[in-house]
């Protein structure tokens, strides 16, 4: 599946919301259980943190990746959390890795020195994609939260951006 990557546009909000809501429904990628509206995703797209989309034929959005705040304290301003979600029919085709690589480049251009995320232990595809993009697993948060009443552990992944560490 051929795809290209660009910054998310306001017109992408419905597709971004639909893809995120797949992740919520599947219970494989987030502790969130409430579906997101197009308006909520529009606010995220218009926010202070970059979001990228992969798109294919007819500008159809195949996936998205975005940065968000790690912590509010100024000393952590160079660290961002990342999220990445791929539309169900587009999975397993390398789109996630290309999106994550582009997001790393975007983070580098914005002077971030570290990216991190938390991934469910059982999400082996996301863990493998992160390893392939230079992330390392640094630990496990046990019983990080409940999803549908079940405690789940998450693995913490991080990637330094050496060009921004002086």
Image (cartoon, rainbow, N blue to C red):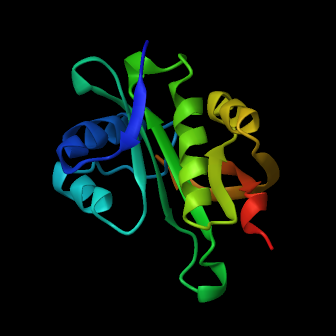
Which image quadrant is residue 70 in? bottom right
Q: Nearer the viewer, residue 111 or 34?
A: 111
Q: Nearer the viewer, residue 76 or 145?
A: 76
Please report the residue visible at 42 percent of the width from the left and 35 percent of the height from the top.
Answer: 5
State whether residue 150 appears in this view. Answer: no
Where is the N terminus found, in terms of image quarters? top left
Please report the residue visible at 42 percent of the width from the left and 19 percent of the height from the top.
Answer: 90
Seen as rendered, the residue at the extreme top is: 1
Q: Is 28 left or right of 141, judged from the image as shown?
A: left
Please report the residue visible at 81 percent of the width from the left and 74 percent of the height from the top.
Answer: 166
Q: Nearer the viewer, residue 132 or 3?
A: 3
Which image quadrant is residue 87 in? top left
121 over 141 or under it: above or below: above
Seen as rendered, the residue at the extreme bottom is: 74
Q: Nearer the viewer, residue 36 or 143?
A: 36
138 over 47 or under it: above or below: above
Residue 73 position within the rendered picture, expressed as x and y whole percent measured from the top left: 59, 86
State whether residue 35 appears in this view. Answer: yes
Residue 136 position within the rendered picture, expressed as x and y whole percent measured from the top left: 80, 47
42 over 62 or under it: above or below: below
Please report the residue visible at 48 percent of the width from the left and 20 percent of the height from the top.
Answer: 91
Residue 141 position within the rendered picture, expressed as x and y whole percent measured from the top left: 73, 58
Residue 2 position within the rendered picture, expressed as x and y whole percent measured from the top left: 42, 15
Q: How many marks?
A: 0
């Amino acid at each position: 599946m051929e795809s290209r990557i660009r910054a998310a546009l306001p017109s992408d909000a419905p597709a971004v919301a639909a893809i995120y809501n797949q992740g919520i429904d599947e219970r494989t990628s987030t502790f969130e259980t409430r579906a997101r509206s197009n308006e909520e995703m529009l606010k995220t797209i218009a926010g202070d943190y970059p979001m990228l989309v992969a798109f294919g034929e007819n500008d159809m959005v195949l996936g998205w990746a975005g940065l968000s705040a790690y912590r509010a304290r100024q000393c952590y301003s160079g660290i961002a959390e990342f999220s990445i979600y791929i539309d169900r029919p587009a999975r397993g085709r390398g789109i996630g890795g290309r999106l994550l690589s582009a997001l790393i480049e975007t983070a580098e251009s914005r002077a971030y020195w570290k990216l991190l995320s938390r991934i469910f232990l059982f999400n082996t595809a996301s863990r493998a994609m992160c390893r392939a993009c230079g992330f390392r697993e640094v630990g496990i948060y046990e019983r990080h939260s409940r999803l549908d009443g079940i405690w789940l552990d998450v693995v913490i992944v991080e990637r330094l951006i050496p060009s921004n560490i002086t």
